[in-house]
Amino acid sequence: MITALYSDQVIAENAPMDRRLAALILSRGNRVGYITSGPDPQRAFFDEKRRYYMRYGLFLDPFVDLDALSDDEEISRLFSCNAIHLSGGHTGDFLRRLRQSDMLDKLSAWALDDGILVGTSAGAILMTPTIAVDALFSGGSPDAVQDGAALDLLPFEFFPHLNDDPGYISALLRYSETTATPILACRDGEGVILGNGLVEIFGAPLMISGGFAEVADRGRIADLLSRA
């Protein structure tokens, strides 16, 4: 399994991570499936992302709306792709759609079977054990989240857009004192690519645990992955 977690994606600062990810995908083929977090009837977000991937020789297809899955053939097309992209959006709604469409376990199994899974913002949060940290974006408390279990592919939680509000870091420090799971927090333009022996860090994400924050270290992440 290879996972790529972006805070944001369609910005120039992500070019180094984009190039590395593209090389990993192109070593297998050039098709990237796309799962939208919610309604995109005009496919505006999809078209933007399709143009973005085309810069790197990658083709975004198919477009999958979890509310309108047609048949097993559509699911087979998705899982025949060389990578799958989970879009940004409302994390809670995305998780609900994955559950209602019976895709949560299927997506997890596909990823664990040597898949390449890419997530931006909400899509990246979903790769972790819980979406609890997403509560901070609406002024809530992660500790109050009761039903946040997600794909559980990684041994840490993920918090994007750290740069959007100076209050996020103090809230994450408080939350880290009540959870045993470390939190990887990224600013826009930062991210990680992990798996199959890879621990590649782009920018200077923070690893937060036990009320402390430090710049994410390759060795610390590698150790977490080895014990997962």
Image: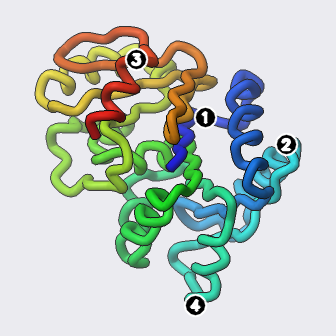
Residue 35: x %, y % from top left: 59, 63
Label 3: how many residues lie within 10 Å, few (<14), some (14-19) or many (20+)?
few
Residue on which disc 1 sits: 8
| Residue 132 in sight in this render | yes
Say which element carries label 2.
loop
Cβ atoms at labels 2 and 3 below 8 Å apart = no
Residue 67: x %, y % from top left: 51, 77
Quadrant for residue 23, please give it.
top right
Say which element carries label 1.
loop
Q: Given the image, on which type of amino acid does mark 2 rest?
A: Tyr
Position above or below: 5 against 109: above
On residue 56, which mark appears?
A: 2
* First in sequence: mark 2 vs mark 1: 1
Q: Given the image, on which type of amino acid does mark 4 rest?
A: Asp
* First in sequence: mark 3 vs mark 4: 4
Position above or below: 157 against 169: below
Q: Residue at x 37, y 76 (%)?
A: 100
Kindly report which numbered mark, 2 or 3, lies closer to the viewer in this rendering: 3
Kindly report which numbered mark, 3 or 4, lies closer to the viewer in this rendering: 3
Q: Residue at x 52, y 44 (%)?
A: 3
Residue on which disc 3 sits: 219
